[in-house]
Image: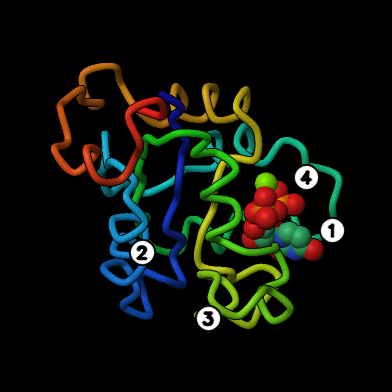
Amino acid sequence: MERTLIIIKPDAVQRGFVGEIIGRFERKGLKIVGLKMLPLNDALLSEHYSHLKDKPFFDSLKRFMKSTPVIILCVEGVEVVDTVRLLCGITKARSADVGSIRGDLAMSQSCNVIHASDTVENAKNEIQRFFEKDELFDYDKTEYLHVYAEDER
Ligand code: UDP
Ligand code: MG
């Protein structure tokens, strides 16, 4: 089954949304296979946001992402990369769909409470970037009997 990487950003940690955000993934039926808190450093962020290195907001984005420790999650599910992006909503939070995490909890294009991998290939790289092998867990989630039909599991 597919896996994706989620970061609960410093603004969400500061605003007390960690439980709310993790709860949304749990309620959706996604399986948490890795979870930890850690501070991000410049090297890690330069790699993670390398696609934005020429943007004028690159340095302030890195300062923001280093401002408190963040929560990193790896979640699993059928086609979970796309599903989690839908749950997050678009980058500019004040225009994100009502009902999405960004649409419900944020106003900013920078402080938008959450990161999620955007493709299956990027998810694989990002999971490797943030998790050691022994920090990811395989286990049976009994709920899958009711979350997915037989041919989807
Ligand atoms: N970002 C920003 N200003 C912008 C665009 C993006 O500060 O104009 C930040 C924002 O925190 C965003 C992150 O850079 O979540 C990564 O940008 P990306 O385009 O990859 O958006 P995402 O995949 O997070 O929706
Ligand atoms: Mg992105």
- What distance separates the C-alpha of mark 4 from that of mark 3? 25 Å
Q: Nearer the viewer, mark 4 or mark 3?
A: 3
Q: 10 Å neighbourhood of mark 3: few (<14), some, or many (≥20)?
A: some
Q: Which residue is mark 2?
A: 24
Mark 1 nearby-residue class (10 Å; few <14, some 14–19, many ≥20): few
Q: Is residue 69 visible?
A: yes
Callout 3 amino acid: Asp
- The residue depicted at 31 percent of the width and 67 percent of the height is 18
Of badges 2 and 4, the one in the foreground is 2
Q: Under tag 1, what secondary structure?
A: loop
Q: Which residue is rendered at x = 28% and y = 55% of the image? A: 26
Q: CA distance from mark 1 to mark 2?
A: 33 Å
76 shown above or below 19? above
Tell me the number on the disc at residue 104. Answer: 3
Left or right of 40 in this view: 19: left
Q: Secondary structure at mark 4?
A: helix
Residue 103 position within the rendered picture, expressed as x and y whole percent measured from the top left? 60, 77
User: Mark 4 = which residue?
Assistant: 52
Type of amino acid at the residue the image marks with label 2:
Arg
Going from N to C along the chain, the mark reached first, 4 or 3, is 4
> Percent position (x, y) of residue 23?
28, 64
